[in-house]
Image (tube, grey):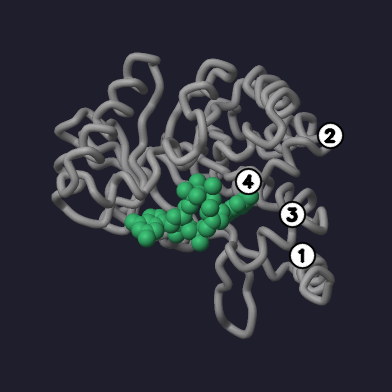
């Protein structure tokens, strides 16, 4: 309870901040998008979301916090795109947010206010979202997709009935869970499963992103298996907006 009122105060005080982790085209090595990742500033440190997203969901604070995250990230990336960077944005969603009454309208409002084109925004949901509230979550997500935003299934392969989800909801992208990436090349079953996920994505016309790439040989394997995109500490850690500007600006 104390943490919850503390978090509410932190939002009011502007004590949340965003880091951005680049998503890289594995063929060209170009940064094609960034994923916004929220942090809390406290005593000169950045507190990771694992320590506050859960409590924020329980208290309902995730609704205004999530709106702040979406607004902040969309504004930032819209400005980058004005200076001719063709860069996309991915934002993580919680199920509480998706099921909150005005969420679809909020996304539309944020797009209008920021000027970000809908197709530059990817909304990431993990499979838990689809499990907990199948009918309603799928309906809301379909409405969101009708706004023109892209949908991604995060941590793909970890949830129960991953394939069933793809039947019920049209998605534009799957993000392969880091637990697959970790053992690619080292464990033959994992390698085969990963290859199968990549082909599945390709056959369904979806973009496939491998998460958690830390080693050059993982990158090479994934590239050789036709995985289009990757994300991980090998290429870039989550960083402040200014870090993205110098990274991408330096490349162009
Ligand atoms: O950034 P980090 O790896 O510490 O993130 C840990 C977890 O927090 C991940 O599962 C990530 O999806 C989640 N997370 C990060 N930023 C956000 C956010 O803005 N909203 C939500 N709902 N979850 C987030
Ligand atoms: O659940 P989600 O995929 O949104 O989680 C994103 C989180 O994964 C971020 O908090 C980010 O810090 C973390 N992350 C990104 N790349 C790597 C990586 O290469 N290794 C590890 N261990 N974590 C990573
Ligand atoms: Mn994510
Ligand atoms: Na996530």
Q: Secondary structure at mark 4?
A: helix
Inter-mark Cα distance, 1 to 4: 18 Å
Q: Which residue is mark 4?
A: 75
**In front: mark 4 or mark 3?**
3
Q: Secondary structure at mark 3?
A: helix
Residue 152: percent from the left, percent from the top?
51, 32
Q: Are marks 2 and 1 in contact (CB under 8 Å)?
A: no
Q: How many marks?
A: 4
**At 54% from the left edge and 26% from the top edge, which residue is drawn?**
119
Inter-mark Cα distance, 4 to 3: 24 Å
Residue 252: percent from the left, percent from the top?
29, 44
Ligand 1 has an atom within 8 Å of the beta carbon of the residue at disc 3: yes
**At 64% from the left edge and 37% from the top edge, which residue is drawn?**
129
**At 19% from the left edge and 30% from the top edge, which residue is drawn?**
225
- Res 57 label: 3
**In front: mark 1 or mark 4?**
1
């Amino acid at each position: 309870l104390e943490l919850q009122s503390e978090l509410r105060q932190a939002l009011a005080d502007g004590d949340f901040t965003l880091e951005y982790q680049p998503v890289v085209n594995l063929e060209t090595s170009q940064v094609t998008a960034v994923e916004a990742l929220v942090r809390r500033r406290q005593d000169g440190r950045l507190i990771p979301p694992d320590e506050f997203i859960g409590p924020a969901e329980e208290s309902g604070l995730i609704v205004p916090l999530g709106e702040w995250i979406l607004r902040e990230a969309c504004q930032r990336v819209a400005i980058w795109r004005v200076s001719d960077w063709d860069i996309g944005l991915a934002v993580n969603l919680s199920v509480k947010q998706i099921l909150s009454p005005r969420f679809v309208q909020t996304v539309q409002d944020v797009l209008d206010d920021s000027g970000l084109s809908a197709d530059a925004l990817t909304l990431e949901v993990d499979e838990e979202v689809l499990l907990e509230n199948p009918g309603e979550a799928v309906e809301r997500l379909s409405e969101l997709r009708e706004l023109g935003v892209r949908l991604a299934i995060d941590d793909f392969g970890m949830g129960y009935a991953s394939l069933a989800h793809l039947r019920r909801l049209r998605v534009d992208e799957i993000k392969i869970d880091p637990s697959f990436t970790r053992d690619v090349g080292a464990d033959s079953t994992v390698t085969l499963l990963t290859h199968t996920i990549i082909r599945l994505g390709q056959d369904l016309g979806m973009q496939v992103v491998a998460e958690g790439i830390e080693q050059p040989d993982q990158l090479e394997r994934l590239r050789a298996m036709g995985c289009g995109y990757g994300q991980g500490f090998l290429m870039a850690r989550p960083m402040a907006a200014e870090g993205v500007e110098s990274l991408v600006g330096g490349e162009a």
